[in-house]
Image (tube, rainbow, N blue to C red):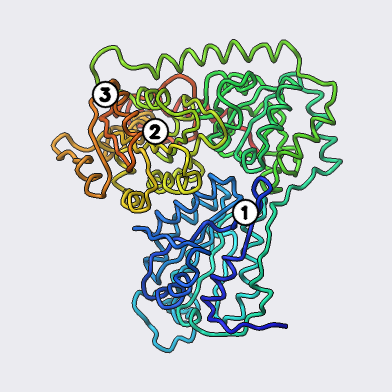
């Protein structure tokens, strides 16, 4: 057996560079690159190994460890989990900065390989700079924070362990059911230790994403449940996109007359104007989809983890029988569902065969078009430009962006009130056009996520919608996008604080407190700030000015930031469903008493059980 003498760091990078995947019949590198911020803990080990890799495995420099991991996650999401990135950091705060991003990937079932530097395995110089000392357990380091937010975790204390750990991590990263972040903590002394690497460990390896067929008994039970239903509704989740099941979904819905509602992750599975698309579901859903959900006697949930925003905190379609088609058994068995464990494409195709000759009753399917038409009229009204001068609403801003957007453009957003407005109102053209991180709703994802989406799809226009709160939390990757030539259009909505949470505070009977900036607080000059990071930037006064500025921003060669002041009090009241946010059991005033009464009424409708 041929042997190559390498350091642990060199073996790791050469292994990653050798991994391949298949997209549209072409073999391409599985890893699109490595984001790295160097410090003690990785600069002397992984640093030289990455430099030596050159074009075989590109290294990208970011400005914040959390942000670079967000970009890597967005890259994987844009590639429907078929390609991914790795991220490496120094010891200590460099590593723990990535913990939040690991949680984002974990919740959203997205692959990213995290390689945080770690303290000395031999412990000779302990405690080193930035080392976390646990008084009763010397094996613990700050990297143990990654354990609960990683699908796979290992700490390499001997170079030979990489021969087992790296393939194990790749198995998780490329498994459709277990997919999520893999963390390999890498002590700085181990990185530079040499060992004998079997040559075949570094050979090219092709990874094809598994697509399991449904179990025949589960399939028969699911088909029988659908045949008995009179008012079926299909909910399309992110798993539809990750399985490339958009075509199978459209065929199934049309052939069997089943209306489709979409989660945040699933939005765009059908084009917004597809005749079977009833719109967004749940707390941030359309009136059309939620009305159908409230009357449905069966819900076929495809590729969704059935989070509270989708189920209306289990109160929206509690009357319906639930069938869950999901590649992950964990998700297929939620909420007492009849499970159908399978790849979304293969599961829908097999269900279609089993249901040959069956269609949903006509009086049910005939409800869809009028309800959708009414909702589309609502969308047109609330997203139209205001007729008089006033601070625009979020809906009016995204309406202007949507109208100006190229058909193949990609919208990126993450947290606050904007995702709710987008889910209800945005008109998505295809699966890649709508890129929302709403599993973890992580403020700060937006700009970094836009960068990752642009790196994945450089020929498509990427537009980031971000509020001033998220922008102030994390904006440094504007500079990265400029340096890389990864041009973004960023529309920054300035409502002077956390307008979304201020509205929630008031909606639950509370008084405005600690969310909006005081009138006496000095305004932030976002234009000057964005320009200082290398972007082009301009303040636009109202919707007409925004509509005039957007084509220029799309045509610009460099990242452009458009700043527009918006109304912090306004949000789209139409559509939506109840969300379980506890209200005080000891109300102190009339507002709290009304909120508590509404809360108890809604909670009585919740579906109980598993």
Q: Which residue is mark 2?
A: 417
Q: Nearer the viewer, mark 1 or mark 3?
A: 3
Image check: 367 left or right of 535? Answer: right
Image check: 191 left or right of 178? Answer: left
Report which quarter residue 546 is drawn in: top left
Quadrant in which the N terminus is drawn: bottom right
Residue beneath the point at 58% across and 84% down: 5
Pointer 3 with pointer 2, Cβ within 8 A:
no
Q: Nearer the viewer, mark 1 or mark 2?
A: 1
Q: Earlier in the sequence, mark 1 or mark 3?
A: 1
Element assignment for label 1: loop
Nearer the observer, 151 or 207: 207
- Mark 1–mark 3 Cα distance, whole angstroms, equals 44 Å
Report which quarter residue 127 is drawn in: bottom left
Q: Residues within 10 Å of mark 2 (few under 14, many from 20)?
A: many
Q: Earlier in the sequence, mark 1 or mark 2?
A: 1
Q: Which residue is mark 3?
A: 545
Q: Residues within 10 Å of mark 3 (few under 14, many from 20)?
A: few
Image position, residue 218 (x, y; %): 82, 40
Element assignment for label 2: loop
Residue beneath the point at 61% across and 81% down: 160
Image check: 362 left or right of 468? Answer: right
Quadrant in which the C terminus is drawn: top right
Element assignment for label 3: helix
- Mark 1–mark 2 Cα distance, whole angstroms, equals 28 Å
Q: Which residue is mark 1?
A: 179
Pointer 1 with pointer 3, Cβ within 8 A:
no
Q: Nearer the viewer, mark 3 or mark 2?
A: 3
Q: On screen, 250 above or below 334?
A: above
Image position, residue 156 (x, y; %): 55, 76
């Amino acid at each position: 057996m041929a042997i190559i003498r390498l350091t642990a760091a060199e073996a790791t990078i050469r292994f990653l560079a050798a991994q391949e995947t298949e997209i549209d019949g072409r073999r391409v590198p599985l890893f699109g690159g490595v984001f790295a911020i160097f410090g003690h803990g990785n600069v002397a080990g992984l640093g030289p190994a990455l430099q030596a890799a050159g074009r075989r495995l590109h290294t990208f420099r970011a400005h914040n460890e959390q942000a670079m991991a967000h970009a890597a996650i967005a890259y994987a999401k844009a590639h429907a989990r078929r390609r991914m990135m790795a991220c490496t950091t120094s010891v200590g705060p460099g590593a723990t900065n990535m913990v939040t991003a690991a949680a984002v990937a974990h919740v959203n079932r997205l692959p990213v390989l995290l390689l945080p530097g770690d303290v000395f395995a031999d412990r000779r110089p302990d405690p080193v700079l930035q080392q976390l000392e646990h008084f009763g357990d010397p094996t613990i380091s700050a990297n143990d924070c990654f354990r609960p937010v990683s699908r796979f975790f290992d700490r390499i204390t001997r170079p030979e362990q990489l021969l087992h750990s790296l393939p194990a991590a790749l198995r998780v990263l490329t498994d459709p059911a277990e997919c999520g972040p893999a963390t390999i903590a890498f002590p700085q002394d181990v990185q530079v230790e040499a060992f004998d690497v079997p040559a075949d460990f570094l050979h090219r390896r092709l990874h094809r994403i598994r697509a399991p067929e449904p179990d025949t008994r589960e399939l028969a039970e699911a088909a029988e449940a659908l045949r008995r239903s009179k008012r079926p509704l299909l909910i399309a989740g992110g798993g539809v996109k990750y399985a490339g099941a958009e075509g199978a979904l459209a065929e199934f819905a049309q052939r069997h007359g089943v209306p489709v509602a979409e989660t945040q992750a699933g939005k765009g599975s059908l084009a917004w104007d597809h005749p079977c698309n009833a719109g967004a579901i749940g707390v941030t859903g359309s009136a059309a989809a939620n009305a159908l959900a409230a009357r449905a006697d069966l819900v076929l949930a495809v590729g969704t983890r059935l989070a509270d925003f989708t189920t209306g905190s289990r109160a929206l379609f509690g009357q319906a029988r639930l069938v869950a088609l999901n590649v992950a058994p964990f998700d297929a068995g939620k909420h007492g569902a009849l499970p159908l464990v399978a790849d979304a494409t293969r599961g829908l195709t097999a269900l279609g065969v089993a249901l040959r000759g069956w269609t949903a009753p006509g009086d049910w399917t005939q409800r869809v078009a009028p309800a959708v038409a009414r909702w589309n009229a609502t969308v047109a009204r609330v997203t139209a430009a205001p007729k008089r001068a006033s601070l625009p609403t979020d809906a009016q801003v995204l309406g202007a962006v949507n109208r100006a957007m190229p058909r193949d453009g990609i919208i990126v957003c993450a947290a606050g009130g904007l995702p709710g407005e987008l889910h209800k109102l945005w008109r998505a053209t295809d699966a890649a056009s709508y890129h929302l991180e709403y599993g973890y709703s992580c403020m700060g994802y937006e700009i970094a996520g836009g960068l990752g989406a642009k790196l994945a799809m450089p020929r498509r226009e990427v537009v980031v919608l971000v509020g001033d709160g998220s922008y102030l939390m994390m904006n440094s990757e504007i500079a990265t996008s400029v340096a890389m030539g990864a041009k973004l259009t960023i529309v920054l909505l300035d409502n002077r604080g956390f307008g979304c949470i201020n509205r929630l505070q008031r909606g639950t009977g509370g008084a405005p407190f600690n969310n909006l900036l005081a009138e006496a607080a000095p305004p932030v000059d976002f234009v000057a700030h964005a320009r200082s990071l290398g972007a082009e930037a301009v303040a636009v006064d109202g919707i007409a000015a925004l509509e005039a500025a957007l084509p220029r921003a799309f045509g610009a060669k460099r990242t452009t930031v458009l700043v527009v002041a918006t109304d912090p009090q306004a949000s789209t009241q139409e559509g939506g469903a109840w969300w379980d946010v506890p209200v005080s059991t000891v109300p102190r005033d009339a507002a709290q008493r009304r909120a508590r009464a509404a809360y108890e009424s809604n909670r009585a409708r919740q579906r109980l059980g598993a």
